[in-house]
Amino acid sequence: MEKRQSGSARRQQIVDAALAILNEQGVHRLTAAEIAARVGISDGTIFRHFPNKEAIVQAAIDSFEALLFAGFPPADPDPLARLRTFFIGRLALLREHPAIFQLAFTDRLAEAAGQEGADRMRAIVLRQFAFVRHCLVEAQERGDVGADLAPETLVWTVIGMLRGVSMVLQQGVIGPELISGESVWQNLETLLRRSAVPRGVPQR
């Protein structure tokens, strides 16, 4: 017997199940039957909350965007401090909502969403990249990060670190409780700041 839930709570359960299925199994397993089994409801109950599967995917993108950009962008006059808040926040999101975080590095949600949804997903991803790039360019202008490095290279240094942590957790190599966002950021910031040391000056 299905446990009664409020309409909004049930809708969120359906959306969360859809996101988890996409992350773990891909678009081909995103069916009403699979979603219903995850939530513990009948197929028919799903369509009392959503008119069709496309509406579920659109709601999943809404949820994805809302979680990704909660409190965004960080407000701090120091660009590396803003980047730190973003980076540590992303690692916290990875621990709390792994499906949301990991879908940011795949095309699975875009594949399920049709052209309009795919365009939305690209805009969401590009918004993050633009923020990271802006912080790094500003840090270069302040002399905190090496100006001779292409901003795109630096962006991929930051995004690549996030993606690497995501892959390690996804593969079960290490548990999320063993990863400190602050510690990972401190190592990354050290790399970024060392790039600002003038040539010929010994690095410690």
Image (tube, rainbow, N blue to C red):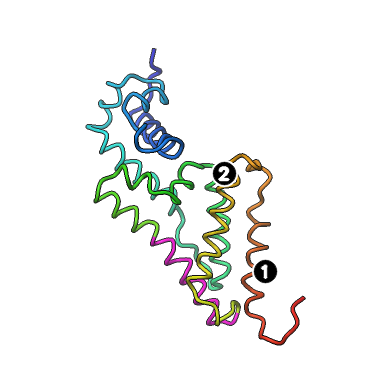
At which x and y percent is residue 69?
Answer: 43, 54
Count how many numbered circles sit on residues in the image. 2
Q: Residue at x 63, y 79 (%)?
A: 196
Query: Is residue 21 toward the left or the right of residue 47 in the image?
Result: right
Query: Is residue 127 toward the left or the right of residue 148 in the image?
Result: left
Label 1: which residue?
A: 190
Q: Is 28 in front, or is 35? A: 28
Quarter of the rendering containing residue 131 = bottom left
Indicate yes or no whether the magenta region holds residue 8: no
Between marks 1 and 2, how big is the CA–CA gap? 24 Å
Indicate yes or no whether the magenta region holds residue 135: yes
Q: Which amino acid does the dot numbered 2 rest on?
A: Arg
Label 1's element? helix
Q: Which residues are magenta?
A: 126-143
Label 2's element? helix
Work out whether 166 lies above or below 86. Answer: above
Quarter of the rendering containing residue 112 = top left
Q: Is 104 in front, or is 95? A: 104
Q: Residues within 10 Å of mark 1 (few under 14, many from 20)?
A: few
Q: What numbered label is drawn on residue 95?
A: 2
Q: Residue at x 57, y 53 (%)?
A: 164
Quadrant into which the N terminus falls: top left
Magenta stretch, main secondary structure class? helix
